[in-house]
Amino acid sequence: MEIMTMFKRFFILVFLTMSLGLLTACETAEERAQVHYEKGVALLEQGDVDRALVEFRNVFKLNGFHKEARLAYAQAEEDRGDIPAAYGQYLRLIEQYPENLTGRRALARLASERNNWKEVARHLKVAQELAPKDPAILAMRAGLDYRNALLDENAQAAALVVRVAEALLAEDPGLPAARRVVIDDRLRQQDLPGALAAIDEGLKQAPDTRMMYLQRLSVLENLGQDDAIEAQLKDMVQRFPEEQIYRTLINWYVSNDRRNDAEAYLRERIALEVGDGIVQLELVGFLAQHSSPQAALDEIARILADSSGEGENQAQNRALFRSVRAGLDFDLGNQEAGIIEMEDILKDAPASDETDKIKIALAKMLIRTGNAVGARARVEEVLEHDATQGDALKMKAGWLIEDDQTGDALLELRRVLDQTPRDADAITLMALAHERAGNRDLMGEMLALAVEASSRAPAQTLRYVQFLLTDKKYLPAEAVLQEALRLKSTNPALLGALGNVYVQMKDWGRIQGVIDRLEQIGTDQTRNIANELTARKLASQDRNDELQAFLGGLTEGQTGLQASASIIRLRLAQGDVSGALDYTNELLKDDPDNRALRFIRGGVLAIDGKPGQAITIFRALVSEDANDERIWLALYNLHRSQGNIDEATKLLAEARSALPQSANLKWAAAGEAEKNGDIKGAIAIYEDLYALNSNSLVIANNLASLITSYRDDDESLRRAFGIARRLRGTKVAPFQDTYGWIAHRMGNYQEALSYLEPAAKALAGDPVAQFHLAQNYVALNRDAEALAQFQKVVELVQLKEQAGGPRPPFMDKVEAEIIRLSAAAD
């Protein structure tokens, strides 16, 4: 009994010891987490952000719910410009602590800066419940309400919100969201002095807000205050040295015909930054673009003479400028010599960052000459030396996207953004990767972020606008263009895109405003865009007499081939074929040997119902120069349109013999093979085209469609899905049919139905689309609808067979299904 009692006491003691040990271990983990947190805070105070973030990550390993560490981590990422990372950390914070006001407020603020208004509304709803009188939250609410009022075209509501924002600023001038509302209102009202005053007041509160400086530049430009613009740009160069604003100053000098001042400024910077080859490179590029290639080569010769001494830096400088000279030679048409020079430079070059840049430049040359294998090899060499080299990672990611390896591409791009969170090119590539993967929502978010990261540069802005217009989001597209134009108010591409948005919105008053602005700028390019918009406006309003008078005025007043082509195109668009032909004939009287005008005349004659004359012209042109694929294609299409199928086929073979690498001729050959029932041949050609350009939606669609329609194996299905997943969410009928059929083949019948039904409705004369829908109805046990659909397929195929078309291989299946379903119905 005593022994049993002793054992009991022993086990109780062991149990208590273990419990206390576990409790102590738990407390130790929390204490260790707190130690890491305090170290992280101390490192942040010392400015050592990278090591601080390591400490915070150590906190999360021990205590994933450490609120203060999560908040500090998010704020540190935001402070160093990695907004996606910061946003993710704030999201994690509110997932763990849904009523954390700081997190909600930060998320609403960051979402508003990214124009993600759905997220703004979500976080503001909670934040306002937590702090209904918080000025920062009220200011962001004003921003959201202001945007909604503009989208609803409710001027009265917008004006009311502006007054709210003004009242908030009167109480607290340091509310950026309210300040943005007031500035935007002044700009929209064209109250330039008021906008300038609002911006200046905002800069007093936040003197390092780059966007307000850019807005201020736009206002000064519209006010014509050139001296103030120059002074501000010079101030910004000092204030934001890492942003390389001096390039904007150089461009401003050039746009104001002050090239000598631009060159002098670059030389001044070179004198101040002795040994820094970057500005010398800028000078060489400037001379090549604005003076002459020879002037740039002379400058390189001087630089090489000055760097003839010994030492590692001098050797690197010589290599760098030899590579620039090789690049200039390449661009002047001496491609082989340029590449040989680059390879000679690299032959004995030591591994270094500068050598990596030269290898990247060579890789880009090799791509332009069609040597993708050589380019990839050079990029891999760079990554072996420096696995984080941004340009190499971006090039590799681009190739991975082309190869449909979107997951790997995104990993490479995240490595770029870990180093340079505002790299607009990397963010754009992420958008393309998401597009290829079929994630249009993420694609849109990345395109919007690229616009912001590039400071609303035209290329990124236009790409995002095109995305918005695909979904007919006219008002958001207008807003994006307006924001970009506030920074670059004379950019022809942005103004033309804005005019196009207004044409689609039928907003005649605003179209006229864009036209007036284009005419005021007064270059040939802007006048052509203005003329195009004017003609489209008059045509859309059915003001035919005014349109004809306008076109007549253009005929008298315009010169140059581009302007003439625009006039002919506009006349054809209005159905005035004889007027277009007369005008073309008049032009040819003055320049009878002009190939472009002769080609245009052939096209107009074909439209005018005179194919014989058109063929004669095209034949003469192709006999003079067999390397012009446009003429071959015009001849081919003209013969097909006349029903001369055999002649068209012979002509296509002749054209491909002359131009075996022509993608457009390959495209025509693929279509020909498909029409003739040579599906294997068509797939082979589309595979070749896809290897050349995997970014083409149409090529991707046609290849995936043929693979899934005529092959049954699992490997082909996986390949087709990899190609076609970018079509997810599409509203284009042929793309809907392709994606829907792949979804059906993968067993996702309900998803397939949402694509196949609208596709079959839009492609009512296509037996393949009707067959796909019929098969999906069978899978969903909708037998009556399937039977009707199969019968429709039979009717369409009979019509095509009567016209000489081949019998589709799925017809045995169709006939068998009709028998089966009819018997079941009886």
Image (spheres, rainbow, N blue to C red):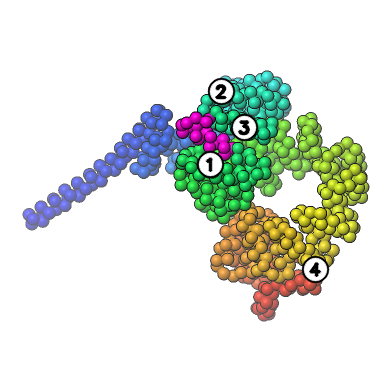
Mark nearest the camera among 4 and 3 is 3
Mark 3 vs 2: CB contact within 8 A: no
- Residue 322 forms part of the magenta stretch: yes
Q: Earlier in the sequence, mark 1 or mark 4?
A: 1
Question: How far apart in space, not on screen, are marks 2 and 4 (Cα)?
Answer: 71 Å
Read off the residue under disc 2: 271
At 57% from the left and 62% from the top, the residue drawn is 719
Task: Residue type at mark 3: give it.
Answer: Val
Read off the residue under disc 3: 284
Looking at the rendered structure, the secondary structure element under dot 3 is: helix
Q: Which mark is residue 345?
A: 1
Mark nearest the camera among 1 and 4 is 1
Q: Which mark is residue 646?
A: 4
Write down the region rendered in magenta.
307-324
Looking at the rendered structure, the secondary structure element under dot 4 is: helix
Mark nearest the camera among 1 and 3 is 1
Question: How far apart in space, not on screen, are marks 1 and 3 (Cα)?
Answer: 19 Å
At 48% from the left and 46% from the top, the residue drawn is 383
Mark 1 vs 4: CB contact within 8 A: no
Q: Residues within 10 Å of mark 3 (few under 14, many from 20)?
A: many
Q: Earlier in the sequence, mark 1 or mark 3?
A: 3
Question: How far apart in space, not on screen, are marks 3 and 2 (Cα)?
Answer: 15 Å
Seen in the picture, residue 698 relative to 273 is either above or below; the reply is: below
Q: Earlier in the sequence, mark 3 or mark 2?
A: 2
